[in-house]
Amino acid sequence: MNTSIALIGGETFTPEFESTHRQLIDLARSSRATPDDGPVRAVYLVTCASHDGTERTDYLRDRAQRKLGEMGVNVLT
């Protein structure tokens, strides 16, 4: 099993990060045993905002699911 990990902090979902997300998704797809192993899965941890309260962490979780989901990623939180 091949696994990749990317640790990204800061303004993760600004437009400047979109190309980074696409590169990581392409890397994940290319490391599969077969090209059609279903959607790429990603785990999104909202650790940096944990002190900001539930409302903020829920917002960031939902944003990750929406933005990465639009790119065909199954986001686990």
Image (cartoon, rainbow, N blue to C red):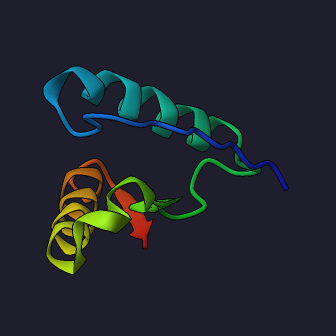
Q: Which residue is outermost to the bottom?
A: 54
* Quadrant of res 66: bottom left
Q: Nearer the viewer, residue 5 or 32?
A: 5
In the visual, does 70 lie left or right of 12? left
In the visual, does 74 lie left or right of 7? left
In the visual, does 24 lie left or right of 13? right
Q: Residue at x 57, y 56 (%)?
A: 36
Residue 15 locus on image (x, y percent) = 15, 26
Q: Residue at x 77, y 50 (%)?
A: 33
Q: Residue at x 25, y 34 (%)?
A: 11
In the rendered view, tell whether residue 16 sits above or below residue 7.
above
Q: How many marks?
A: 0
Q: Which residue is outermost to the front?
A: 51
Residue 42 locus on image (x, y percent) = 50, 58
Q: Nearer the viewer, residue 11 or 32?
A: 11
Residue 22 locus on image (x, y percent) = 38, 31
Which quadrant: the N terminus? Answer: bottom right
In the rendered view, tell whether residue 43 sits above or below residue 21.
below
Which quadrant: the C terminus? Answer: bottom left
In the rendered view, tell whether residue 53 sits above or below residue 26.
below
Residue 50 locus on image (x, y percent) = 36, 66
Q: Residue at x 52, y 64 (%)?
A: 38
Q: Nearer the viewer, residue 71 or 11?
A: 11
